Structure formats: C-alpha cells, structure tokens
Amino acid sequence: MPIEFRCPQCSKLLRTPDDAAGRKARCPECGHVSAIPQPGAAPSGPAADAFPGINTSGASGAGAGAAPGAGQGGSFGPQPAGPAPSGQALEPHPIDLNDIFQTGWAVFKNTLVPALVGMLVVMVASMVGVFAAVLGATAVAAVLGEVLGFLFGMFLFIGVALFMAWLHAGQLLYFLKLVRQGNAELGDLFTGGPYLISLLITGLIVGLAVSFGMLLLIVPGIFLAIVFSQALLVVVDRNVGPGEALKVSWDITEGSRLMLFVLWLLIAVATSILNALTAGLATLITAPFLMVLQPIVYLRLTGQEIPHYE
C-alpha cells in the first residue's frame, strides 16, 4: 500500500510508493525536504497528492530532494526545479574540496549528454545572435550610410546583450535543474525571462565592483569576485532582486572563501593545462563540467540537497 504522510513544513498530505520508506523527498508544495516514514507510521487521509515527477523506484536518492548518500544512483522524473522557497533563510555551510570534486565528477558522469548538449545549444544560440547583429549592422551601413549603420549597430549591441543575459539565466536554470534532478529539458534554457532584469543589474554591479577592486592591487577584486560569486544563482534559484542576491551571496560564502579561492585556482590551472595539451579540444569536457560544478558549489554552500551518485 502507498505510504501517506503530511509534510512537516506545510502539512500537505502526500503519498509515495511503499518501497520508498527511509528515503528523502522534496515536498512539491513548499520545497521542504523530509524523510519518508515507514509504512503505517504516518497519518493517512482519503485524498493524498503524490510527489509529482519523483520516481522513488530503484535506489534511494531519486527525486529532487534526495540527500547525498541516501542511496545508490537513482532515476529521476520530470519534477520542475523551481526557485527555492524565498521565505526560508539560507544558512552558510562550509564546503570541502574533496566532496565538491567527487560530487561534481559523479554528477557529471551521469549527466554528460544533457550537460554537453545544453552547453552547445547555448553556444550556438549565442553565435547566431552575434552573427545576426553584425550582419544587420553591416547591411544597414551599406544601404543607409556609416552613421545610421553605427547607430543601428549600437541598438543591435544592446539587443545582443539582453539576448545573452536571457540565455545565461536559462543556462543557470538548466544546470541547476540538471544537478538537482539528474535531467533537464532543452526548453529550460529559454525560460530565463522572469529573471532577466535582476540578473542584468546584479551582473553589472558585480562586474563594476570586481573591476574597481582589481584596480586596488588586485586582491580586493579577487575577494569581491569570491563573495559575490553565487549572486546570479541566488537570483534564479530564489527569484530575488539584486540587493538580496548580493547579501545572500556574501552571507553563504562566509567560512568558505579561502576554499572557494583554492577551488577556482585549481580549476583555472587544470583547465589551462588540459586545453594547452589538447589544442582546446578538452573544452568539450571541461566547459560542461564547470557548468555542472557551479550549481553543486552553490547547493553545498546553502545546505540544499543533491542526489547521490556512485
């Protein structure tokens, strides 16, 4: 018989298969992660809602809310990876480099194809946008003169910047969902619209702050890059404005800033060596791996759950 129990956070009545006892799952109503009780230990009701999109068959760890180490592998359904509940404060959690790399590699091995496809789709879309803008500006300049061509080119430049920011928001959502659930749809790459303005403003503030810091003997720039490194993911995960995103990023990196510096330094050195040895071909592996690693770091810093892989 199915296991019926209420979410301890919002009291929504839920139902899972009877073989899911002891695993963890995320409530589709409030996002709270809780353990599924043993059969007969939970309150039942006549009308319970199943966890949509969570496949609890097979190994534990299935579903967006599976905890690290909760089982062996896991299969994943189509549960949407919406923003984390913005009403819940994100507490900083120190990261461990060994855990980050082990988790990153395990997730990457299991999501290699969608990670690579997602990266290539964004890359091609970006190239098409830039090419269309250059071609349009050149055509206008040839027909209407250099002055109008220049003005039209500036207009297209703004359009391309907005287009790239929209793509970047979708890319963050896509890889965040991929890490949380083990799968994502290509359509997720084009769902960044609601976050566009906040993402643009946040990115602009971070860029200006880091650039100014770099002028002050580099070290302040590196520090600001680290403390604000999670701001864009905060925007798309919690659907908050720039001020809140910057504050949250500052808070959650506390206690892990040195580890973050070492992490990105190791990555920069390793990717540079691999790309040099392979004439750039290693980018096909290192680029999607880094796109997977970025949300893993964010989820670890905020104590959110990541499915377990062997």
Image: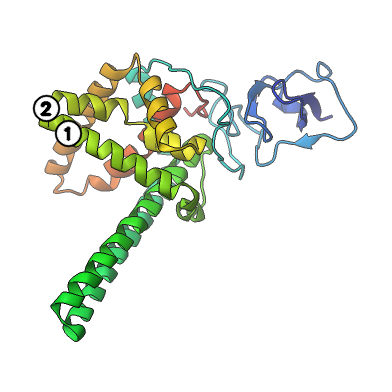
Label 2: few (<14), some (14–19) or many (≥20) C-alpha neighbours in 10 Å: few
Question: In the figure, is residue 94 to the left or right of 56?
Answer: left
Q: Which residue is mark 2?
A: 216
Q: Identify the residue at image location x=45%, y=52%.
A: 189
User: Do the numbered discs 2 and 1 sit on residues whose CB atoms are within 8 Å?
Assistant: yes
Q: Say which residue label 1 marks.
A: 212
Look at 34% across and 26% down and name the residue there.
101
Depicted 164 relative to depicted 308: above or below: below
At mark 1, the secondary structure is helix
Q: Quadrant of residue 126?
A: bottom left
Residue 120: give x, y in percent of width and height: 34, 55
Q: Is residue 160 left or right of residue 143?
A: right
Question: Residue 246: percent from the left, percent from the top?
Answer: 37, 30
Q: Amino acid at mark 1?
A: Phe
* Image colouring: rainbow
Distance from the alpha carbon under mark 2 to that under mark 1: 7 Å
In depth, the one of 200 and 111 nearer the eye is: 200
Q: Nearer the viewer, residue 104 or 242?
A: 242
Residue 50, percent from left and from top: 75, 37
For residue 106, say whether it is visible.
no
